[in-house]
Image: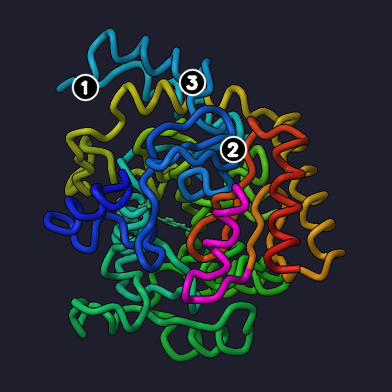
Amino acid sequence: MPPHDELRRRGARVLPPGNSRASLYVPPSPPYAVTGAGAVVTDAEGRRLVDCNNNYTSLVHGHARPEVVAAAVAAMQQGTAFGLPTEAEIDLAEALTRRFGRDLRWRFANSGTEAVMMAVRAARAHTGRDLVVRLDGAYHGTYDQVVGAREPGVPEAVRALTLAVPQDDEPALVQAFRAHGGRIAAVLVDLMPNRAGLRPLSPSFVAAVRREATASGALVIVDEVITFRLGVAGLQSAYGLAPDLTVLAKIIGGGFPVGAVGGRADVMACFDPERSEPIHWGGTFSANPVSMAAGAAAMALYDEAAVGALNASGETLRGALADAGVEVAGRGSLLRLFLDDGGTAWWDLYRAGVLVSSNGLMALSTAMTGEDLETVRAAVVAVLG
Ligand SMILES: Cc1ncc(COP(=O)(O)O)c(C=O)c1O
């Protein structure tokens, strides 16, 4: 039996239909990865692909970048996790603060989902209110309070605490605040929501979010789990927005599990165990030194010059695809193609040697050469042009 079919057969028995993460599912079944090196991933059949998925945008330097691996190995050799804090979490928090250039406080988790959950908790604790406003179609992980309206298993009582408004619909936002203003704890926004089509929010809508939230005493939480790679201080800097809380994950772990909340000192004070009735921020592996060290190494290599060069590659690629008649959205190093639900285009790209996310999201990495980018361009134009 070919290696893929054998893995699929075993996987189907224990992880139906064959693996854990629903986001990786492509019909009839996704290929299994075996190794990654730089911009290339190799699957169980020995096929080599230019990786534009990069573990859903998180591997900004591609696979196994030597400096990041060295930092992780050095950390591992000194013990992978402790029942004591370590200097590594301070290092990463300082590095992130420097990038934003604002006086921020931080807490680390193991995923973006957890970080979103804790940011919402902080907003509720800070404001003493319950409602969360979010944008239709945006994905913020799997926390009950922020999943889509049709996601099964979410109690009605929880659903009722979320108000969804369409992206860029300022009247709907204003109406939500008019109707519920005194009960809204936070507006949660992704400035360029991937699952809603990877189109940046309009600056006027973002300004309205800030204005309405501030006027009503609600907080602004910006989810930069995907978009942080677009600027040294994420996409928020392009909008001149200083959110009350920012959620990060993905690239800041250097390829290891991570999530983070950063924000204003007075809001983040709710996590301070020295204050009365703090929010208990736990997590056995939160701020583990391996994720922290790998993340710090990855961030050190992703300085202003690297961010600018990667975004420029993305703009060049997007322009070339658009010129060839391909519908493509996004900004900088994040691109979004529009694929059919049946997986036909995804597989055509795969066979042409390019791995994209199942919904057509593509994230470039600093490991990509001009030749890799040309492979991507040619494949996308052949399949979708
Ligand atoms: C914008 C956004 N927020 C939050 C999350 C959740 O992050 P994680 O998968 O690390 O839980 C994701 C994951 O893709 C995301 O894209």
Q: Amino acid at mark 3?
A: Val
The correct choice, above or below, for 355 with respect to 97 in the image is below
Q: Amino acid at mark 1?
A: Ala
Q: CA distance from mark 1 to mark 3?
A: 18 Å
Colour scheme used in the picture?
rainbow
Percent x, y for residue 125? 29, 59
Question: For ligand 1, which image quadrant applies?
Answer: bottom left
- The reply to whether the magenta stretch includes residue 346 is yes
| Residues drawn in magenta | 338-353
The correct choice, above or below, for 174 with respect to 294 in the image is below
Percent x, y for residue 3? 31, 44
- The reply to whether the magenta stretch includes residue 286 is no
Q: CA distance from mark 2 to mark 1?
A: 29 Å
The correct choice, above or below, for 44 with respect to 242 in the image is above
- Residue carrying label 3: 68
Front disc: 1 or 3: 3
Mark 2–mark 1 CB contact (< 8 Å) = no
Front disc: 2 or 1: 1
Total residue callouts: 3
- Residue carrying label 2: 102
Mark 1–mark 3 CB contact (< 8 Å) = no
Q: Is label 3's Cβ within 8 Å of ligand 1?
A: no
Q: Which element is circle 1 on?
A: loop
Q: Residue at x 58, y 51 (%)?
A: 227
- Residue carrying label 1: 81
Q: Residue at x 19, y 45 (%)?
A: 280
Q: Which element is circle 2 on?
A: loop
